[in-house]
Image (tube, rainbow, N blue to C red):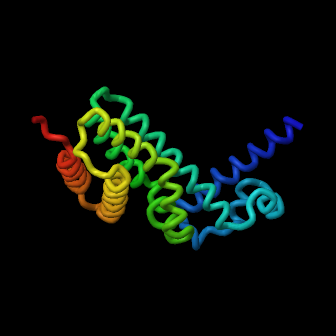
Amino acid sequence: MRRGKEETTETIRQLVDIARTHFTEYGYADTALESIVQAANLTRGALYHHFRNKKELFRSVLEGVQREVADKVEQAASTSEDVWQQLYLGCRAFVMAAVEERNKRIMLVDGPAILGWEEWRAMDQRHSMRLLRAQLQTMQEQGCLRQAPLEVTTYFISGGLNEMALWLARESLNEHALDEAMNALSMFLEGFKQSSA
């Protein structure tokens, strides 16, 4: 019984990994399930046993991308003891991970288009936005952050980071784009600081 479960888990992992490569390279619209099952050396029936359709397979791929990005955010933030540096490093890590070649098409372009903004946002909330909210709450409790509704502030910063990532993805030929984005991010976050009396 356990061996069967392990084989199922491995088959799903293999399908998701191969699908991620195909969705990255060809985009959702031009990815054929047939090419995924051929690369996995499986039948279409085996794929449909685990995923109802291409959209469900894509959803699983995007969930994995979102989880990876959140892990990078957490890792980057944990390299500092300073709460402001943690916030900046986490935000920077989110943007940098979102525009990686293996992530940007899936996360920034096809994700919202295929699943819709509501589902895409819900996925973002479970991962990176959850970490952002927790960091802002800690900062507010420590008196480092201006008093503002936490939920609104979280959505405001998260929306800005998503737009910054989209802008950077389009500005790939601009060698100064990353520096400009990070300078703007730093200045933007400074505006949330609680000024000392």
**Looking at the image, residue 13 lies above or below residue 168:** above
Total labels drawn: 0
- Horizontally, residue 197 falls left or right of residue 174, namely left
Q: Is residue 165 visible?
A: no
Which of the 4 image quarters holds residue 146? top left
**Along the viewing direction, whichever of 1 and 134 lies nearer the viewer:** 134
Above or below, 110 relative to 18: below
Where in the figure is residue 19, as x and y percent of width and height? Answer: 63, 57
**Quadrant containing the C terminus in the rendered view:** top left
Q: Nearer the viewer, residue 149 or 47?
A: 149
Residue name at image x 77 percent, y 56 percent: 50
Decide: is 68 above or below 27. Answer: above
Q: Residue at x 46, y 66 (%)?
A: 109
Q: Is residue 83 left or right of residue 72?
A: left
Residue 41 or residue 149, whichever sits in front: 149
Can you give x and y, in whole percent of width and height, for residue 120 in the image? Answer: 51, 62
Q: Residue at x 31, y 40 (%)?
A: 87
Of residues 95 and 122, the one nearer the viewer is: 122
Q: Position of residue 148 (x, y in %)?
A: 27, 50
Q: In the displayed image of the protein, which residue is found farthest to the top?
A: 81
Q: Quadrant of the N terminus?
A: top right
